[in-house]
């Protein structure tokens, strides 16, 4: 059977320029164009809406199994500054009610798109108005795109959506006067690529698995050819795509000309909004009912956000076995999510859908939970601030360290450790320093900082900040975690750092020193690999439910780095989670 591609529009007017541009022959209620590579069928849904469109898709695909389905049509623009008449492909879409401020159906990524694409919000009905907040979800609005994405996902058919902006969504759009010609021009530009993919299932598979945009689809030819020549089975092909992804490292691009659009989302019930507005200049402030309404959808391209919210539900969580200084009870305290830094190995990439920082402000409720838990435990309890966020990056704004320091001072079984890579700690005074409050610094050799810990302060600045805090009387801990070992030089860098700590800090009465090698759960591993950050994962193997270095590397870490730390710090040194 010849490969077939379907182009579907909602309205007849949107189909017309395709008929004029490609001159297909009428066939039943649609049209057919035969090309050297296969056929393109053209149909419209006669304005019957998204649900009917999926029915039409099912009906058409019964007779013609399509390799690719394309949707083209008008859309409104939510993103500021998008002028009418521009054509975008869609990178993915959600279904959302803008009036209710609810995402009704989760994000589905569009399998095929151009490099410059936009996210789409499909509405349950026309909702004209200026919905500035919705730009955090998507840039374009329509009434049918999500139905197609959903149909494509359910049926395993790659979708490509072209959307042409017709208006800025402030009023009911008047599209009859718009010329949809640019939609047909966009398809004309991409048609060779599209038909090439439709005609070669291995090439299409490689493009989809490697997440390549249409313009770069030819890059996948060598993998398709290899699969063909070597007759690779399904499993071996997927191993091949995995290894290609692991070797690809997306370099951070040149600084964006346009700064991201920055939102400051604050829950309506919060007091003191003014202080956060002043703390985050350049962020557009908005009140929202519940941070999860926005945080649960990954941030739209071109936007970033900071959330100020009240934590509901779980406020503390027991840490896993083998965690922390032996003989103590350890709990994570939830005082925020994410952070402004960008470590390539950060487990939060696979944990939250959204990378924007959330600051929880109901610390009184958190403290009550901590007191309750401490009263149930026999010995001292250490609460770790910094497991789901950096423990101190925003402290100059929240003042959490000084506040918890005051509150726990006379409750001798409660200890708090704020773990950080931040050096923005000049505001902390000796008044907050006491036995039960620990400032923990995550450390790595400078080369590893530059390679793997983007937007973080240098090793030297972290150690300088630690020294200043020690001078003010703060109790400290150091964490060489994770060790990322990919060469003999890496081993030497970690040994040198361990020796520096041993030689300069062993007399300073640190609370704890830990070491752990890179390890992560499967979701994190996949998230990192699929974001084009695979080189940090080199050398990890799947073992005991985790991705981690093989046993011999972990033991070598004990011998080469752990031994030095143990020499310096004795009983307060521990190996983390191994
Ligand atoms: S500082 Fe911590 S929370 Fe922030 S990106 Fe790095 S590992 Fe993740």
Image (tube, rainbow, N blue to C red):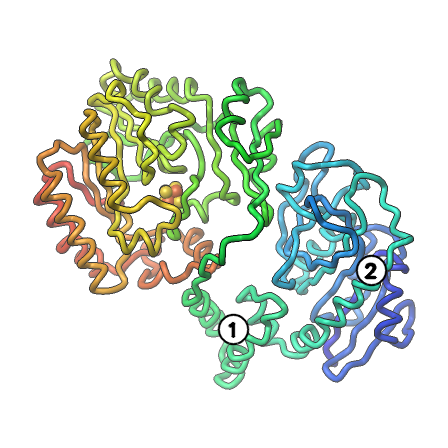
- Residue under the point 65% across and 42% down: 135
- Local packing at callout 1 (Cα closer than 10 Å; few below 14, some 14-19, many 20+) is few
Which residue is labeled 1 in the image?
234
Place of residue 100 in the rendered image (x, y in percent of width and height, measured from the top left):
71, 32
Name the front one of labels 1 and 2: 2
Q: Quadrant of residue 270?
A: top right
Task: Specify whether residue 32 is in view.
Answer: yes
Would residue 48 appear left or right of 157 to someone viewing this image? Answer: right
Place of residue 249 in the rendered image (x, y in percent of width and height, measured from the top left):
43, 63
* Label placed on residue 9: 2
Q: Vertically, is 242 above or below 349?
A: below
- Residue under the point 20% across and 61% down: 552
Q: What's the CA distance linking mark 1 and mark 2?
A: 34 Å
- Residue under the point 80% across and 57% down: 73
Q: Quadrant of residue 391?
A: top left
Q: Vertically, is 352 above or below 448?
A: above
């Amino acid at each position: 059977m010849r490969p077939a591609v379907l182009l579907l529009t909602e309205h007849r007017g949107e189909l017309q320029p395709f008929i004029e541009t490609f001159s297909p022959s009428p066939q039943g209620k649609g049209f057919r164009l035969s090309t050297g590579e296969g056929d393109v069928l053209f149909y419209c849904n006669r304005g019957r809406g998204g649900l009917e469109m999926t029915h039409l898709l099912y009906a058409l695909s019964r007779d013609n199994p399509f390799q690719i389905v394309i949707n083209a049509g008008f859309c409104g623009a939510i993103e500021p500054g998008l002028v009418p008449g521009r054509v975008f492909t869609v990178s993915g879409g959600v279904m959302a009610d803008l009036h209710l401020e609810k995402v009704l159906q989760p994000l589905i990524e569009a399998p095929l798109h151009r490099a410059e694409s936009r996210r789409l919000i499909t509405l349950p009905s026309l909702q004209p108005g200026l919905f500035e907040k919705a730009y955090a979800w998507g840039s374009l609005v329509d009434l049918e795109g999500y139905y197609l994405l959903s149909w494509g996902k359910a049926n395993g058919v790659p979708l490509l959506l072209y959307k042409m902006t017709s208006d800025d969504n402030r009023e009911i759009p008047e599209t009859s006067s718009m010329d949809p010609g640019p939609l047909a021009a966009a398809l004309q530009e991409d048609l060779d690529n599209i038909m090439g993919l439709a005609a070669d299932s291995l090439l299409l598979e490689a493009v989809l698995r490697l997440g390549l945009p249409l313009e770069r689809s030819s890059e996948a030819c060598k993998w398709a050819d290899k699969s063909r020549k070597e007759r690779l089975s399904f499993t071996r092909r997927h191993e091949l795509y995995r290894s290609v992804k692991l070797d690809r490292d997306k370099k951070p691009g040149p600084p964006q000309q346009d700064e991201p659009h920055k939102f400051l989302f604050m829950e309506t019930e919060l007091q003191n909004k003014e202080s956060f507005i002043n703390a985050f200049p350049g962020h557009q402030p908005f009140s929202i009912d519940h941070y999860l309404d926005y945080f649960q959808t990954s941030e739209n391209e071109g936007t970033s956000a900071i959330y100020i919210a009240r934590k509901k539900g779980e406020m503390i969580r027991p840490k896993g076995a083998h965690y922390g200084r032996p003989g103590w009870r350890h709990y994570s305290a939830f005082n925020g999510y994410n952070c402004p830094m960008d470590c390539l190995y950060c487990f939060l990439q696979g944990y939250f859908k959204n990378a924007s920082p959330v600051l929880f402000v109901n610390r009184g409720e958190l403290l009550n939970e901590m007191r309750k838990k401490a009263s149930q435990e026999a010995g001292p309890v250490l609460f770790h601030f910094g497991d789901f966020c950096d423990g101190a990056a925003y402290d100059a704004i929240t003042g959490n360290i000084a506040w918890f320091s005051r509150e726990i001072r006379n409750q001798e079984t409660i200890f708090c450790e704020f773990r950080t890579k931040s050096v923005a700690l000049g505001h902390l005074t000796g008044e907050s320093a006491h036995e039960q409050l620990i400032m923990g610094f995550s450390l790595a050799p400078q080369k590893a900082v530059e390679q793997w810990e983007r937007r973080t302060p240098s090793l030297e600045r972290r150690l300088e900040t630690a020294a200043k805090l020690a001078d003010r009387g703060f109790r400290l801990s150091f964490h060489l975690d994770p060790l990322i070992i990919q060469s003999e030089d890496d081993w030497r860098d970690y040994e040198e750092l361990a020796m520096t700590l041993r030689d300069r800090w062993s007399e300073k009465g640190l609370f704890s020193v830990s070491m752990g090698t890179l390890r992560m759960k499967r979701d994190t591993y996949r998230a990192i690999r699929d974001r084009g950050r695979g080189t940090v994962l080199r050398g990890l193997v799947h073992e005991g439910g985790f991705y981690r270095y093989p046993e011999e590397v972990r033991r070598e870490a004990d011998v080469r780095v752990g031994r030095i730390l143990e020499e310096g710090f004795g009983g307060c040194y521990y190996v983390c989670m191994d």
